[in-house]
Structure formats: C-alpha cells, structure tokens
Image (spheres, rainbow, N blue to C red):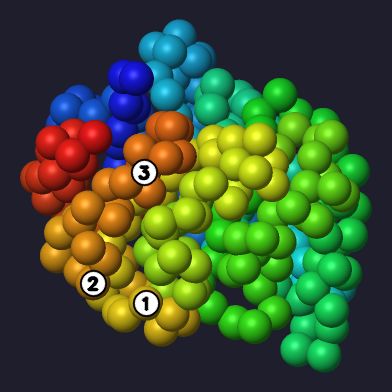
Amino acid sequence: MKWLIGAHTAGEHPIDEIVERDADLCQFFLSDPQGWKKPPEREDAAELVASGARLYIHAPYLMNLASPNNRIRIPSRKNLAQTVEAAEAIGAAGVIVHGGHVGDDEDIAVGYERWRKALDTFESSVPVLIENTAGGGHAVVRDLENYGPLWEKIGDYNVGTVLDTCHAWAGGSPLENASQIIIAATGKVDLVHCNDSRDPFDSRRDRHANLGAGEIPGDVLAACVVAAQAPIVVETPGDAAQHKADIAWLRERL
Ligand SMILES: [Zn+2]
C-alpha cells in the first residue's frame, strides 16, 4: 500500500506546509481551537479544491457533543455543523472530532445517543471522523470497545474513525490490537494520529512526543499503524523539519 502521511500544521498555507514536509497531506484548524466562532470563509477555497490536496480539518477542542450541559452540547452541535460546511467548501477529506465525555454520574451510553442527535442536525459530504481520547472514566471512546455500541447508533451517518496512538496508549488500550478492535467494531480506521507519548502506558495523560522519543516501543507503534491501513497524521511537537523527521521515521518502518 502507498502510505499517505502528513502532519498537523498551521492553516494559512496548507499546500506550502505539505511541500515543506515532503508530505502527502496535512491537517489544520479552520477556526480558533479554543473558541466557538464560526470558521471564516477562505479566499483560497476554490484554489484548495482545485489543487486536489488531501486536507483534514480538526474541530475545536472545546467541542463536546456528549456533554450533559446544554451550554456546551448545543454550541458544540452548531459549531460542528459550521465546521463541516466550511470543510466541504475547501474539499476536505474529513473533520476530526474528539469523542467527548458524559457527566461524572452518567452512563456512557447516553453519550452515544447525544452523538446521534448531533449528527441528525446536518448533512454533509465530508465525513465526521471520531477520535479516541486518553483521559477520564467518562470519555465516550477512551475504551476502544465503545466504538461498537456507538456505531450501532451512528453507523448510518457519514462518520468514520480516528485512532490516536498516544491517546490509546495513555488511555490504557494495548496498541497490539487497537486497530483491530476499531476495525471489528466499525469496519475500518479512516485516519491514524501517529504520536509517541511522553507518559507511561495507562497514565491517562495526553502529551504527544516525537516518534521514537517517547514511551511507546517503536516496533509496537509501527505495527499498530500498519494494522490500521489508513492515512496518517503526525501531531508531534516542533517545526516542519521535526515533522519531516517523524514522517521519515515512520516511512522507514512501514
Ligand atoms: Zn489526535
């Protein structure tokens, strides 16, 4: 298989970011990751579509579609619909959203239903790719087995999966079968976030490291990525040169 690999980058000039890293794709934000503002229209939208570049959009971090709190859940829905629309305008390949978390006293199953309601509020040609997260006992998809019951609720919508290797490791899911669990539950992994972890297995901490520089054994990380059979984004620290080194590290091992 021809592996498509890129990095999370700044969003102003995505094509340049891809070229600078000898990459095949990139991922970026369309709006402030810590805000609720609607993504602004991009003047380069037609140019990006025409370029055919493979672009992934990461939704803001504030978003929590599974929240018990209306004042978070409702703006999250609205912002997701707006982000997906803006992603469609630039011909993006997917919008990545964290699985989110329910309240401390709630059953995780209410989160699956809140996801269904959110996806029911808009239509899009761009898939919403739901990413596993590292922390919290009430995270919707910290436990990768939860993709199964989540997909029973939302599998008919335009959705897909993102496996973040740092989140799985820190969240206590062995990488030896992480890809296989998601594939068994949903059919496939749509995107891998290939990150090493600064913290030990099951630490519940989310701190990414450059590939080979963290706690995840290199062969385990590479085998997990191979098993996923999906495009890859590195969300590692550093500048373009560092990303280029991470991409090269990965290419040597795939
Ligand atoms: Zn990630």
- Residue 95, above or below 111: above
Residue 157 numbered mark, or none: none
Does ligand 1 reach within 8 Å of label 1's beta carbon? Answer: no
Disc 3 designates what residue? 225
Residue under pointer 1: 201
Q: Residue at x 43, y 80 (%)?
A: 202
Q: Are marks 2 and 3 in contact (CB under 8 Å)?
A: no
* Mark positioned earlier in the residue sequence (2 or 3): 2
Q: For the residue labelled by badge 1, is the local secondary structure a helix, a strand or a loop?
A: loop
CB under 8 Å between callouts 3 and 1?
Answer: no
In this rendering, the count of numbered labels is 3
Disc 1 crowd, CA 10 A, few/some/many (<14, 14-19, 20+): many
Q: Which residue is mark 2?
A: 215
| Relative height, residue 71 to residue 156 (above, below) | below
**Mark 1 and mark 2: span between their CA atoms?**
8 Å
Of 126 and 138, nearer the camera is 138
Which SS class for mark 3? helix
Query: Do labels 1 and 2 touch, CB within 8 Å?
Result: yes
Image quadrant holding the N terminus, namely top left
**Residue 39 at what x, y percent from top left?**
59, 44
Classify residue 69 as left or right of residue 191.
Answer: right
- Disc 3: CA contacts within 10 A as few (<14), some (14-19) or many (>=20): many
Q: Amino acid at mark 1?
A: Phe
Asked whether residue 157 appears in the rendered view, the answer is yes
Seen from the viewer's position, the closer of residues 134 and 201 is 201
From the top left corner, tell me how far across and down residue 60 is, in percent: 56, 58
